[in-house]
Amino acid sequence: MGEQPNETEASQPAAVNDEQQPGAEPITEQTAPTTAPTESVEPTDEWSVAAQQLIDEAKAALRESDDTSIPPEQRIDQLEELLAERTDDLQRIQAEYVNYKRRVDRDRAVSKQQGVDSVVRELVPIVDAVAAAAEHEEITGGFKAVAAEIDKLAAKLGLTSFGAPGDEFDPNLHEALLQIPTADYPPMAVAQVIQRGYQLGSVVLRPARVAVAVEPAE
């Protein structure tokens, strides 16, 4: 009579081989995909910060108004009042920002004009010397092109000259150095220009030095 199999050995499962069987797919540990948190962009200028603060306050007020113990009519009144307050706040912030932008633009324009004024004031003696040389026909050769470029630059920057015989004497524009009795020009007119004047826009950089006509003695 043959031996019966040991029930303990028969019921014992076969040992699992830890080594991967040929052709089987590798067993990998499944991990949940991770998503990098999105960084919120914080406002940097004071108006954006104030606007964001108003939005946060409005959201908080909306959460508070979600109380079911408050009658719907009362909640509507609260929300309308909140909306009116926040609208006024936003309009105030917008007005402040507009005023700030105007102030910055004005300061930028003033700074730019101050730089132009500084350059033009340094340019006046050069333009004056070129004009004097041109009057005496001393500009020859290649210097003519240089003189033309200097005049072009002066005109581009807004520098203009004034003062000519026959102009009416204006103490805001002219500096009278002497009087010339003459019948060629009416009294108190510019009879001779000793040195031209220059102005930048409406600003007089240098008055014209002139001789004023007076009636000749009989």
Image: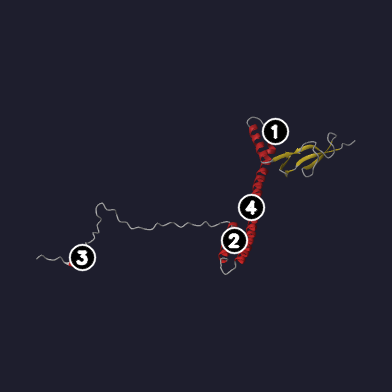
Mark in front: 1 vs 3: 3
Quadrant assignment for the C terminus = top right
Contact, CB < 8 Å: mark 2 with mark 3?
no
Q: On the image, which quarter does residue 215 sit in?
A: top right
Which residue appears at 62% of the width and 66% of the height?
74
Badge 3 density bin: few <14, some 14–19, many ≥20, Cα 10 Å: few
Mark in front: 4 vs 2: 2
Most distant residue in the left direction: 1
Which residue appears at 62% of the width and 61% of the height?
83
Badge 2 density bin: few <14, some 14–19, many ≥20, Cα 10 Å: some
At which x and y percent is residue 50? 59, 59
> Alpha-carbon distance for marks 4 and 3?
88 Å
Q: Which residue is mark 1?
A: 134
Disc ID at residue 54: 2
Most distant residue in the right direction: 218
Q: On the image, which quarter does residue 70 sit in?
A: bottom right
Contact, CB < 8 Å: mark 4 with mark 3?
no
- Tell me which amino acid carries mark 1: Ala
- Tell me which amino acid carries mark 3: Ser
Between discs 4 and 3, the one toward the N terminus: 3
